[in-house]
Amino acid sequence: MVDRIEEIGPKLAALADENESLGKLSDETVALLRSAGVVRLLQPTKFGGHAAHPRDFAEAVMAVARHDGAAGWVCGVVGVHPWEAAQLDPRIAQEVWGENPDTWIASPYMPNGIAEPVDGGYVLNGRWPFSSGADHCEWDFLGALVGDGKGKPATPPAVLHVILPRSDYEIIDGTWDVIGLSGTGSKDVVVKDAFVPEHRTINQGDVQEGQAAARHGVTDTLYKLPFAAMFPLGITAAVIGICEGALAAHIGQQRDRVAVTGVQVRDDPYVLYATGEASAEIEAARIQLIDGISRLYDKLDAGQPVTIEDRSNVRRNQVRCAWRAVSALDEIFARSGGNVIRRNNPLQRYWRDAHVGLQHMIHVPGVAYHANALAQMGLELPPQMRILI
């Protein structure tokens, strides 16, 4: 898969500025990604996917992001949704991929809607920002609070993941005007009085605790992994890949750059030190991310129980990977010279994309580190913290 991505890499890179201008991925970019099959990596083999190891998925996302951060981000977000869909009622997979295995699913999961119970399912209303890649998706996973019958959330709150076809939601143009990752087209979506059949819903906790797969007779190790390990994986992989692309651009530009002093930059020990250190930090981020998900996968594959400490270790490391890689990028960006700020210099786009990617809530370090410290001490995690681990 990575070899296939590298073959189309120059074309992806050449389209990156167009994607940014469009505010979404171009049709040509999407065609390239579909031809490579990145989004089908976690999809069940029965429906044209690869049911790949999550390590392979992360490496593929990084490879795409090295050439275009927005394309890598969309692959990381949209590419994890087949993993969840595979765990749900088997009718969903048939509805989504029965006619076209290249059908894409968007999200977001934040519970911005109210799902009122009715006979046979729910009636959903709400508005959700940050639906990455929505223009090229035919279904959308959305988070929703179960309603009380009066348009308010029920007490105690219950959160659902629901999946809707394109005909049941509206993509709102003009809602994605941002400083980075513009090409992801992460627009708002609106749902008005859409009926959602019961089989197209799942309790958020069942997915987060890895229980959904067992409930529907899915036995592959891949689909037993907890949501809080898998959903962040693609997003953080995209951020690391963006930083790898930035590093490559920096190295290419510094090789022959001459400083204002007349000294070639390749003879400047400070720039060389920063470049070498950044290379080590970004590679360490890659290794740590892949190692974390691989160890979790191996435990499940061996039939061993996964503890809350295991899970919190993966989240802790995933957050640290993103911050480590972006901090390294900042160091080389600061030493790349004045021309780095020009719009025609790809390094400035990588820098903006990386920082916007770091703003995603799964990269907030406080909760992840706090939870991990509690878990290492053998203490109970508060419920609102546990759902993020």
Image (cartoon, rainbow, N blue to C red):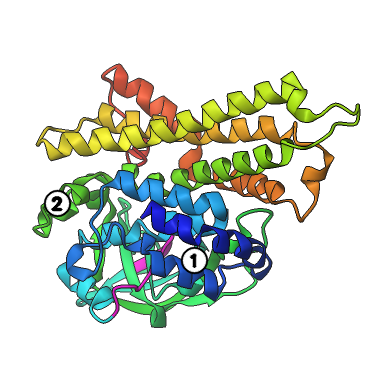
- Residue at 29 percent across and 33 percent down: it is 311
- Residue at 33 percent across and 58 percent down: it is 154
Where residue 21 sits, quadrant-wise, is: bottom right
Left or right of 104 in this view: 343: right
Q: Which residue is mark 1?
A: 133
Is 104 magenta? The answer is yes
Left or right of 260 in this view: 115: left
**Nearer the observer, 196 or 35:** 35
How far is the residue under mark 2 from the one under mark 1? 28 Å
Instruction: State the SS at label 2.
Output: loop
Q: Position of residue 302 (x, y in %)?
A: 11, 35
Amino acid carrying label 2: it is Asp
**Nearer the observer, 81 or 237:** 237
Left or right of 75 in this view: 71: right
Q: Position of residue 289 (x, y in %)?
A: 39, 35
Circle on res. 290 = none
Is 71 magenta? The answer is no
Looking at the image, residue 262 lies above or below residue 192 = above
Circle on res. 220 = 2
Q: Position of residue 241 (x, y in %)?
A: 51, 45
N-term-proximal mark, 2 vs 1:
1
Q: How many marks?
A: 2
